[in-house]
Image: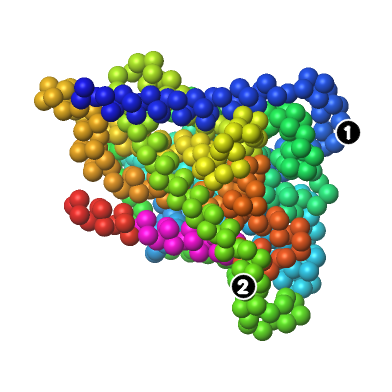
Amino acid sequence: MKNKGYNSLRVFIIVFLLVSVVLPLITLMSHIDPSDIPAVFQSPQFMPMIRNSLFTTSVATLISVSIAFALAWCVNRSNMRYRAVFAMLFTLPMLIPSISHGQGLVILFGDNGILTNLLGININLYGYVGIIIGSILYSFPPAFLMLTDVFHYEDYTTYEAAEVLGLSKMKQFMTITLPNMKRPLISAIFATFTLIFTDYGVPLMVGGKMMTLPVYMYREVIGLLDFSKGTIIGIILLIPALIAFLLDLFNRNSTSNSTITQAYLIKENKKRDLIAYGFCTLVIILIALPILAFALLSLVAHYPIDLSLSLVNVQKAFDLGIGTYLLNSLAIAMATALIGVILTYFCAYVTARSQRNFTALALHLIAMVSLAIPGIVLGLSYVLLLKGSAIYGTIIILVMVNVTHFFASPYLLAYNSLSNFNEKLEDISLTMGIGKLRMLLDVYIPCTKATIVEMFSYLFVNAMVTISAVSFLANFKNMPIALMIPQFDSQSLIEATAFISLLILLVNGTMKIIVYLAKRYILSHEA
């Protein structure tokens, strides 16, 4: 009887994951009209779309991961001051939607852009150039976060031995650092490739006449309501995500459990530190340019005719209903974060603190599979599964799709934290007659409060910036504010779109500060 509540919650988690992950994918597959398969593959625009998507994604991924690796090295292998501040600033692009980066490039380098007019240089933004630059801007921060943590786990004794043997710094980098980083780099490359390959925000803004697969899918479904062709493209978009998922599982299972015997010793080197400062500062400037552009367009009367400071554009944006859409976003993000934390944490508790039985393994697999489903594909599958249901067209379905879309990352945070507890705790609690639910409430949750706060932050921020998962499901009543960017852009209301991007950044920035203070408070009271 003690575990009755625990068993009920476990059944609820199983049902939720089956309904939110498994059934939508099955429904997606079942809605393909066989006659549309040759129509899609033999259409004259299909091969150019494939080439466009693969070329822009490959180039952007290579540059993005290279930048992320260089930044991770600068932060962890130099004596720069304020490294924590630099690391925090590098993640700013994650706080606005990908479509905002495309909009920022238009404001800066478009035909009538700020820098285009100021410098008199046209970089031919629309097409390959714009998509690649925009994709790099929003994709390098996640890669940076993936790589920077790995540097903390390098053992200095290997480098010390290499120095004794007379190996140069370059030799040490090639023979020690790169082999140590091989698996994380592979994971970062495939994760970044998938992120860029499935995004339609940047190509929609700066693609011009060049079509990519996600933009084609978006236009087929939203514009033409052709769900069958949209589904076919959705399955194609699923392929690199599944490959990345399988490789990540392989890497996760083959990682070394070695421990660090000596932390990395960073020696004095003023030339190295100067280069690191220069590179990191340049990246910060490039990150800041779109944000400054959003602020300029929001706070001047009429660019480029009247550059006097004015709140007329802010007032106009609120007259267009931005306040309502912001409230929608805040409600969706808050509900996604609260419900998502409960579901992901309890799911992690079931899988991490139970015996390795079929139920635990199946739950872990389904939770991880959600990582491999692009948002645009998940959104379409929810349309096909839930259209006509009681929750279709409500905020509930938007919260549900967001929780599913972002389920895997907070789940893994909780799973890793809960796996660190002594494996005998359950046996001890059973001997003392303490139920599993009581152990969860009295032991695990109080000891992992900092992790829970981080999970909440991740879900809230991503729910604020996503456009892919909700684009097929939102209507004018429940639309989140991020979806107003393409709406207003199509009406040439660039000042309003700039203000929306700035508003989202301010909301997410505020949330990050609150989370930082909350974690400091938790850690200080645990010490």
Image coordinates for residue 513, horizontal then vertical, percent: 40, 61
List x then y, in percent, for residue 494: 71, 65
Asked whether 314 or 324 is in front, the reply is: 324
Q: Residues within 10 Å of mark 2 (few under 14, many from 20)?
A: many
Residue in the image at 16% along x and 23% along y:
430
The amino acid marked with disc number 2 is Val
Compute the Cα span from label 1 to label 2: 44 Å
Q: Residue at x 37, y 60 (%)?
A: 514
Give percent across and percent down for residue 399: 51, 43
Closest to the camera, between mark 1 and mark 2, is 2
- Magenta region includes residue 427: no
The residue labelled by disc 2 is 314
The image shows residue 259, relative to residue 86, as above or below, that is above
* Figure check: 156 above or below 349: below
The stretch of residues the image draws in magenta is 501-516
Give the side of residue 276 with respect to residue 57, left or right: left
Q: What kind of residue is marked 1?
A: Pro
State the SS at label 1.
loop
User: Residue at coordinates 20% horizontally, 37% vertically from top-left?
Assistant: 443
Q: Which residue is under mark 1?
A: 44
Considering only order in the chain, which callout, 2 or 1, is on the residue closer to the N terminus?
1
Magenta span main SS: helix
The answer to whether 433 is drawn above or below residue 480 in the figure is above
